[in-house]
Image: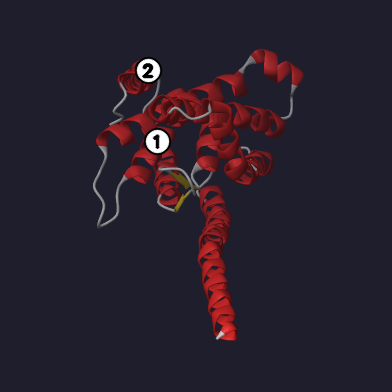
Amino acid sequence: MPKSVSARLFVALIVLSGLLVLGDAAFNARSMPTARFAGFLLVACAAARLKIKLPGLTGTMSVNLPFILMAAAEMNALEALAVGFVSTLVQCLPGSRQKFNLVQAAFNCSAITLAAAATRWIYASPAVTAMVPSPALRLAIAGGAYFLANSAPVVIVIWLTEQVSILRTWLEMFQLSFPYMVASAGVAGISLTVTQEIGWQVPLVVLAIMAGIFFSYRRYFAETAIRPAVASLELSASDGARAEARV
């Protein structure tokens, strides 16, 4: 829980807003979730467990974004928001040596719920549909709105807690996640183009693609973390060689 009172109030606002949006979708749902939705949600949760620790940030990034975008485009409000909320909750589940942070999980799940709602609203907007008839391109635009709606609460909490530059923090987050956002929107857009209905094959293919992206990201960040240590060792070895040469 953030120590700053203003940060606590903002976290509470996001959690309350997300729960209200999810509750409204459940109250106005006209049909019960189907087996197709249950299978899709299961694969989305599996993708959510493939998470990467971003350097300089306390949170993680998982590869469940294409599933959230596809759900926002193809499913009803309750199903789309449930995919975002539940898969994010699965992402927040700690490992064997970690503790579950209820406040952080509630904030993350609510922020993703609000972002998914914004994505669905923009994708289905008559004005956007009239200007951008292509579903894939429209989903890419909605994906940009998703990133803004998702990153803004996180950056604001960091600003309220640590008093750092909002713009600089957001740009760092954007730089780290932009390739992943483009890949996710591209995979989701292609999925909408090649099939009219999300069958059981589509989530599995998307999961395989995103798993490849996950391992690439993990290897890249692992090498990035190792480089300073290697440089330090090389510098120490060089200093030792100089000292021996002087002797």
Query: Residue at (51%, 60%) from the top-left corner?
Result: 225
Query: Which quarter of the rendering shows the N terminus?
Result: top left
Q: Earlier in the sequence, mark 1 or mark 2?
A: 2
Report the mark closest to the observer, 1 or 2: 2
Tell me, yes or no, if residue 210 can be seen here.
yes
The dot on residue 34 is 1
Asked whether 175 or 237 is in front, the reply is 237
Amino acid type of the residue that numbered disc 2 sits on in the rendered structure: Ser
Residue 184 against residue 216 in the figure, above or below: above
Q: Residue at x 41, y 31 (%)?
A: 162
Distance, label 1 to label 2, CA atoms, is 26 Å
Q: Is residue 83 above or below residue 205?
A: above
Q: In this rendering, does residue 75 appear at all?
A: no
Query: Pointer 2: residues within 10 angstroms few (<14), some, or many (20+)?
Result: some
Kind of residue indicated by mark 1? Thr
Q: Position of residue 130 (x, y in %)?
A: 73, 16
**Res 138 → quadrant:** top right
Q: Residues within 10 Å of mark 1 (few under 14, many from 20)?
A: few
Q: Label 2, secondary structure: give it.
A: helix
Left/right placement of residue 89 relative to residue 77 reads left
69 w.r.t. 239: above or below = above
For mark 2, what is the residue? Answer: 17
Q: Give residue 118's mark.
A: none
Q: Determine the secondary structure under disc 1.
A: loop
Image quarter of residue 81: top left
The image position of residue 35, as x and y in percent, is 39, 41
Quadrant in the picture for residue 111: top left
Q: Nearer the viewer, residue 186 or 236?
A: 236
- In the foreground, 238 or 50: 238
Q: Is residue 28 left or right of residue 209?
A: left
Q: Is residue 21 left or right of residue 177?
A: left
